[in-house]
Image (cartoon, coloured by chain):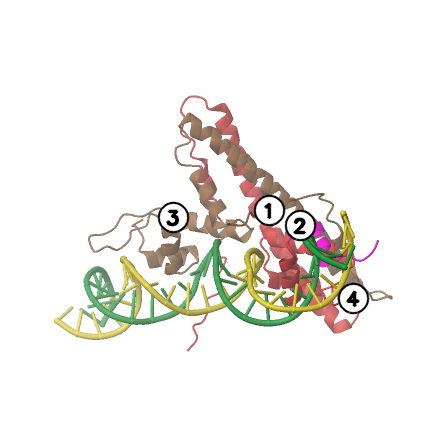
Chain colours: A red, B brown, C green, D yellow
Amino acid sequence: MPPLTIGKAAKLAGVGVETVRFYEREGLVPEPPRRQSGYRQYPAETVQRIRFIRRAKDIGFTLKEIREMLGLRVDASAAATCDAARKLAEEKIADVRGKISTLRRMETVLARLVDCCKKRSASSECPILETLIKEGSDGNKRIKPKQKKK
Amino acid sequence: MPPLTIGKAAKLAGVGVETVRFYEREGLVPEPPRRQSGYRQYPAETVQRIRFIRRAKDIGFTLKEIREMLGLRVDASAAATCDAARKLAEEKIADVRGKISTLRRMETVLARLVDCCKKRSASSECPILETLIKEGSDGNKRIKPKQKKK
DNA sequence: ATAAAGCCTGTACCTTACTACAGAGTCAAG
DNA sequence: CTTGACTCTGTAGTAAGGTACAGGCTTTAT
């Protein structure tokens, strides 16, 4: 398979060419080799990388976090780096699990709502979202306090 | 329990007061009753509502989507509305399931990375993220084509 | 060989989701 | 009964994540 122009790569990944260049500037996609004309030449794996970025973003990771995750692969051979990488990966796993559990609760509640809507027996009123809203028994998730600049 | 001032409600929900007012302007939190002085008086459930908004945002829903979901509860008694609500809820369930499956794949891969890092036997090189990047077998998730305005 | 379509760099602009004042009124602890 | 912490409205600014030209080369299809 021949290398891809930016337009082809973008299309395959489901984004615009501007986005690909933006990701390159942001260090999410490595700078590809160029033709003598200056045209970028993408290997096929870049498409997968971009798709990964998109998926990660859809589930609530920021580009910064995604960049960190992608960085995990480089040079996990150096012992010190490897340790740091492990810690980061562990953190991300915790994030991922938290998100999954939130999503599962949402799924349950939405399913119940659909169900209730399908039956529509008698009493009407279907205040399910109320329950959804009510089940945040996760004591204290602190939000960064954010110090103000002088 | 007495009603809460905006400051108390914000603190309990883990956000700033400005955010609460912002959510009110955006129709995510209903306008609360006021004192004669103009001070807002929040019922305790508003805190849960705000926490819900935050959690939903963390897993990648936009405020627009969240507003829709919260809207599901109002007046699911009207038959027509109920039908529309069911459809929307079903869509959201699909979203939620997609997100869950992406997250599960991520979890697996991250766990494998940690594992590999822990063992660190022999060969070093630990190119696991490569695999992560490679498993996007979801044929074609189209991205909105976005028509340009004249 | 020529014209449409694609790519280049660079800058400007846009939306989303806050966040930060300013200037003025309100509440509650000592 | 004052004073410091809070609240009000309104407007402006910020950060993240793109998106859209402009002006100018390069490819490719006819």
Given contact means CB atoms under 8 Å apart, are the residues at marks 2 and 3 in contact? Answer: no
Q: Which of marks 2 and 4 is nearer the N terminus?
A: 2
Q: Which amino acid does label 1 sit on?
A: Pro
Mark 2, chain letter? A
- Between marks 2 and 4, how big is the CA–CA gap? 24 Å
Q: Which amino acid does label 3 sit on?
A: Val
Instruction: Please tell me the numbered disc located at residue A14.
Output: 2
Residue A7 belongs to magenta span: yes
Whether residue A7 is situated above or below residue A83 in the rendered picture:
above
- Between marks 3 and 1, how big is the CA–CA gap? 32 Å
Instruction: Please tell me the numbered disc located at residue A35.
Output: 4
Which residue does the image show at 78% across and 59% down from the upper left? Answer: A43
- Between marks 1 and 2, how big is the CA–CA gap? 10 Å
Q: Name the residue under label 1.
A: B145
Answer whether residue A57 is visible to the viewer in this image: yes
Q: Name the residue under label 3.
A: B29
Q: Dot 3 lies on which element? A: loop
> Residue B60: x and y, percent?
56, 51
Camera-nearest label, 4 or 1: 4
Identity of the residue furthest to the bottom in this view: A150
Answer whether residue B110 is visible to the viewer in this image: no
- Between marks 2 and 3, how big is the CA–CA gap? 35 Å
Residue density around tag 3, few if under 14, some if 14–19, many if 20 or more, within 10 Å:
some
Which residues fall within the magenta stretch?
A1-15
Mark 4, chain letter? A
Rendered image quadrant of residue D26: bottom right
Residue density around tag 1, few if under 14, some if 14–19, many if 20 or more, within 10 Å:
few
